[in-house]
Image (cartoon, rainbow, N blue to C red):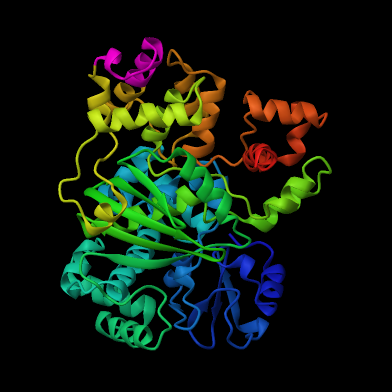
Amino acid sequence: MIEDQDRCYRAVSARDARFDGVFYTAVTSTGIYCRPSCPARTPKRSNVRFYASAAAAHDAGFRACRRCRPDAAPGSPEWDVRSDTVGRAMRLIRDGVVERDGVTGLAARLGYSTRHVNRMLVDEVGAGPLALARSNRAHHARILIETTDVPITDIAFAAGFASVRQFNETLRTVYDASPTSLREVARRRARGGGATGSAPSSGRITLRLAVRTPFDHESLLAFLARRAVDGLEAVRDGTYARTLRLPHGSGVVALTLAADHVRCALELADLRDTMAAVARCRSLLDLDADPVAIDEVLGSDPALGPDVAARPGLRVPGHVDGYELAVRAVVGQQVSVAGARTTLGRIVADHGSPLEAPTPLAHAYGLTRLFPEPDRLATTDPSTLGMPRTRAATVAAIADAVAVGKLDLGTSADRAALREALLEIRGIGVWTADYVLMRATRDPDVLLADDLVVRRRLTERGIDPASTTTWSPWRSYAAVHLWSSTERRTA
């Protein structure tokens, strides 16, 4: 729901890219909708309507602008910040749950009736789950059309459409173009050097992921490099690569980070997983964060201001798999990062599933295995995991809870319920539970006050943890800044 429409129009008049993905501008005189930063002439205020989602603009009869491509804008940071039902629903829809399980499955995950979920989304976002999923499918299809040479008919079903006719009608409605014409335009753009992705190539999808700047990609890449597990992950020449376990099969991704975008190369066993893979990569790199808003709050505190000035646009590293992150958090208890990395390397080598069909990317980066599945670690003799037996038993308990469906570690999990469930597992304390919330569920407001480094930095600066409420809702970012200050001093 857009409440301050005058503020929105000021952003459009200024072509303020900070609002791209936060709201969408529809122009009644042209029938199209745009990003706030669209370079086209600013429309008259009387001809403008504002929508909270691309799907709401579609439902109102508007088509996506071909010039600014609003569907490719970063997602609204609001959906990662919010822990309520609407925020959880938006994260699930973004991950493709409606395509896999239908609206009934979405409602079941949220614990409400389909009617109630539809009503909440229409009230808050301006569109119901089916319309939101349709918008995602259209964007998914456009990625495949423009960045691969997969036959158009195959793309229709890979993107989740029930029929080729529905596929064609949706793309004409959303983009005012046929699938064939979209591909032709993409190829002309590629030949002319203006491609947003890559020229179509068999077996690989390459696209440019939008980010909100400033984007401290160097700190993010360094964080991932220090923790990269052999055979599962690799960091080389500014690129982070890893294997992925996705709803329909395995995949490999290589993410090349730059100051204003991320180049994402995907090799997937099943193209239906494109949308889920992209969503997980965006979550891993925290690409939908609003760094200007975050830095404004944290930078205004004299105790934290110098850190923010030194690292503008610092991100909270997420993860592609909450279960894997939880296991890694337990393995890392009371040991160094290097020690945890070594132990995890043995676990992956001994218990991880080998890639069924190693891809060129996997070969290039030495990626050979997927992280062990929950049922594998749940039934493994703890003494073989190479860590204290009590800690190994905690790993097994997490794996068992995930395997039987008792523990939801996805980005859409109910954060309060997840924290409570984690603390009930023997061997998991406040630090581990909060660390998992911060990285697996993308909770932006976890201070990690029990973290040794965070506590030391707060003490050195004379900051009482109770007074950090002024940093809300961005205390997770404050924690990463405090970690980063230690690394800068060490360097």
| Percent position of residue 261, x then y | 51, 65
Q: Residue 324, position in %: x, y?
A: 37, 34
Figure quadrant of residue 11: bottom right
Query: For the N terminus, which image quadrant?
Result: bottom right
Dividing the picture into quadrants, the one containing residue 391 is top left
At 59% from the left edge and 58% from the top edge, which residue is drawn?
215
Drawn side of residue 337 relative to residue 149, left or right: right
In the rendered view, would you say 422 is above or below 4?
above
Q: Where residue 455 sits in the image (x, y, percent)? A: 69, 26
Q: Which region of the structure is painted magenta?
A: 381-397
Residue in the foreground of this view, choosing between 91 and 344 = 344
Residue at the image point whose x is 50% and y is 61% from the top: 126
Q: Residue at x 26, y 52 (%)?
A: 362
Q: Examine the rendered structure and indicate whether residue 157 appears above or below residue 79.
A: below
Q: Is residue 120 visible?
A: no
Direction from residue 374 to residue 285 in the image, left or right: right
The answer to whether 457 is drawn above or below residue 264 in the figure is above
Q: Is residue 55 visible?
A: yes
Along the viewing direction, whichever of 304 and 287 lies nearer the viewer: 304
Comparing 349 with 174, the one in front is: 349
Q: Magenta includes 394? A: yes
Residue 127 drawn at (x, y percent)? 45, 60
Q: Is residue 71 above or below residue 423?
A: below
Q: Quadrant of residue 52?
A: bottom right
Instruction: Pick out the residue farthest to the front.
Output: 491
Q: Is residue 71 left or right of residue 28?
A: left
Q: Quadrant of the C terminus?
A: top right
